[in-house]
Image (tube, helix red, strand yellow):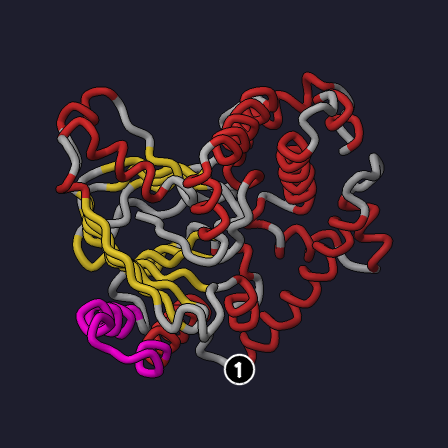
Amino acid sequence: MPADSDPPTLFTRFSTHAFARERQLLAWRDRVGHVVDVLPDRDRIAEGFEGSIDLHAAGGLVFTDARTEALVLDRSIARVSTDTRRDFAFHVYVEGETGHISGLNKKRSAPGSVRGIVAFDLNQRFRIERPACRVLTMFVPRSIVAAHVGDCDALHGRVVPDKAPLARLVFEHFDATARELPMLERPDAIDTLDAGAQLLLAAFADRPHALKDSRAALQTAVKTQVKRYVDTHLHEADLTPMKIVEALGLKRATLYRWFEEEGGLGAYIRHCRLREAADELARFPNLQIADIAYGLGFKSASDFTRAFRRAFDASPLETRLRALELSRSMADDPVKRMRAAHSRGVPESG
């Protein structure tokens, strides 16, 4: 985010109305493309696309008010491995619904399309088939989310329906924020955005009982310890759930239960290796794909390719080529390069 003194506040407004019909969807894609890809088809391009977005930023938080026709948004593993966005985007659907959310590396899928609030971790991939809607989005730095929500990685794709505790307060506050922000001075804007972030985090981390809080704190601490161990030993071929159980003196059944949402500890280790592989495919374009696979404990390149495609809906080669394409696009286009650098602090997701 920009420093408090430069600029004191930030406001941008964008609409597709100024573009020719055949350029409207592509213009929207260009506008939000440094955070998420818009997946158009020829018919949609020819039909035109109505979309508008207002962006406000102050005090380290970003708030957007977007109205769009139906569209498909995709944050692929290539995108995650190429850019530097690691904050959280909370979508509050004040008109329309959440749509169909897929691409989450979770055992359980997100619920069907509802009116509600969705949390997206920009450090993970996702895909949204979204109907026409008005969505208010707040981008919250990862450090703030982690300080309020124990296992913040598990927030990704979680939906809070509009009738859930605190959700009604979030809707009312965000609706008022969208109306009032353009007229607020910087200190009041910061207070309003901060209050919205606190309400969001309370809605997602609401735990009514102290006993449950203490158990959740213990679970979070142990899971954090396990995740650190996995990160440290990720390139060791013998990294297994049993090795972690023995090294940390934990119960395997307990660990499996606590990592159940990820499909178990073994599935979590496998996903971490695949995520690291995706990053290495982007960072080291001259490194053989087989060497990346063997270096992360996979027994064969074919096993790695199958697992990678199941996890990310793309082959390792396709992901590498897409990452190279994104990198070259930013290197060749000074406007995109400037926007990419700017986007590390100021997202504009539709």
Quarter of the image for residue 183 reads: bottom left
User: Foreground residue, 294 or 217?
Assistant: 294
For image coordinates 39% across by 46% down, the residue present is 110
For image coordinates 42% across by 66% down, the residue present is 204
Residue 127 placement (x, y as % from top left): 39, 38
Q: Which residue is mark 1?
A: 210
Verify whether residue 58 appears in magenta. no
Verify whether residue 175 appears in magenta. yes
Majority SS type along the magenta span: helix
Q: Is residue 90 above or below residue 130?
A: below
User: Foreground residue, 154 or 322?
Assistant: 322
Q: Which region shows up in magenta? A: 167-190
Quarter of the image for residue 8 reads: bottom left
Q: From where the camera sits, is residue 168 visible? A: no
Q: Is residue 122 above or below residue 236?
A: below
Q: Residues within 10 Å of mark 1 (few under 14, many from 20)?
A: few
Drawn side of residue 278 relative to residue 11, left or right = right
- Which amino acid type is shown beneath numbered disc 1? Ala
Residue 262 placement (x, y as % from top left): 57, 46
Q: Secondary structure at mark 1?
A: helix
Residue 213 placement (x, y as % from top left): 55, 76
Quarter of the image for residue 7 reads: bottom left
Residue 294 placement (x, y as % from top left): 79, 26
For image coordinates 23% across by 20% down, the residue present is 42
Q: From where the camera sits, is residue 245 visible? A: yes
Q: Is residue 12 above or below residue 300?
A: below
For image coordinates 46% across by 46% down, the residue present is 338
Drawn side of residue 218 relative to residue 88, left or right = right
User: Foreground residue, 219 or 46?
Assistant: 46
